[in-house]
Image (cartoon, helix red, strand yellow):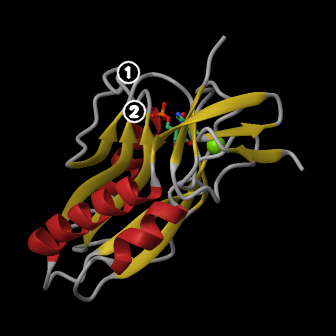
Amino acid sequence: MSMTASPDNQVHIRDLSFQLLFSETMVQERVRALGAALTESHAGLNPLFISILSGAFVFASDLIRVFDDDCEVGFVKLSSYKGTRSSGDVQTVMGLEKDLHGRHLVVVEDIVDTGRTLHFFLNHLQEQEPASITTVAFLRKPHAVEFPVPVEHIGFDIEDKFVVGYGLDYDGLGRNLPGVYQLIEG
Ligand code: XMP
Ligand code: MG
């Protein structure tokens, strides 16, 4: 097995070890708060939640279930992130089929690192003249200044270390961990 858990709140994935950063309980508590805030701001608007695949699918699925009114859900696949370093150009691989004109959009992202992904995607959405765009990121790293993007709701601000769990992967593994784990360096 390539992913193993040890009793000291660590997980080992392939060649790397990760330490628990946010437990499942902490994550769920934070997601409930974000869902409550979105219910406040978006109830009655039939918002379209747009989940950026693949990483945000776990967060999005929990978030929509704590949004307490009608909503719709869509998915978009953008370019990927290789290994543990942000890389390359961002491009839409799989688009949204829905008409976004006049819709209230809630963009759901797993993690904002440099902001490149969101910067690109928000510009793309803006061109379709939605009524509003609100961005929710589960995690944000300190470099999120390189490509300044408006992110209205953040789950947690974290250090600039690679993390896995709750949808985030290392080389495909770790997405199914219910908590968030941070790379042990060195
Ligand atoms: P940018 O730089 O575009 O990066 O804001 C956002 C994307 O990079 C990926 N990313 C990570 N994925 N652990 C991951 O599993 C991390 O620590 C991490 N940091 C960035 C992620 O796909 C996100 O959409
Ligand atoms: Mg990844």
Judging by the rendered image, the residue that carries numbered circle 2 is 115
Identified by mark 2, the residue type is Gly
Ligand 1 lies under 8 Å from the Cβ of mark 2: yes
Residue 119 image offset from top left, x and y in percent: 37, 38
Q: Mark 2 and mark 1 in contact (Cβ < 8 Å)?
A: yes
Which residue is nearer to you in this view: 47 or 154? 154
Image quadrant where residue 2 sits? top right
Report which residue position mark 1 lands on. Answer: 143
Q: Judge left or right: residue 85 versus residue 152.
A: right
Say whether mark 1 is within 8 Å of ligand 1: yes
Count how many numbered circles sit on residues in the image.
2
Residue extending farthest to the bottom is 70
> Residue 169, located in which quarter of the rendered image?
top right
Q: Provide residue 80's location: percent of width, then percent of height.
A: 65, 42
Q: Position of residue 179 (x, y in %)?
A: 51, 52
Number of other residues with Cα within 10 Å of mark 2, as a class: few under 14, some 14 to 19, many 20 or more: many
Residue at image position (42%, 52%) is 109
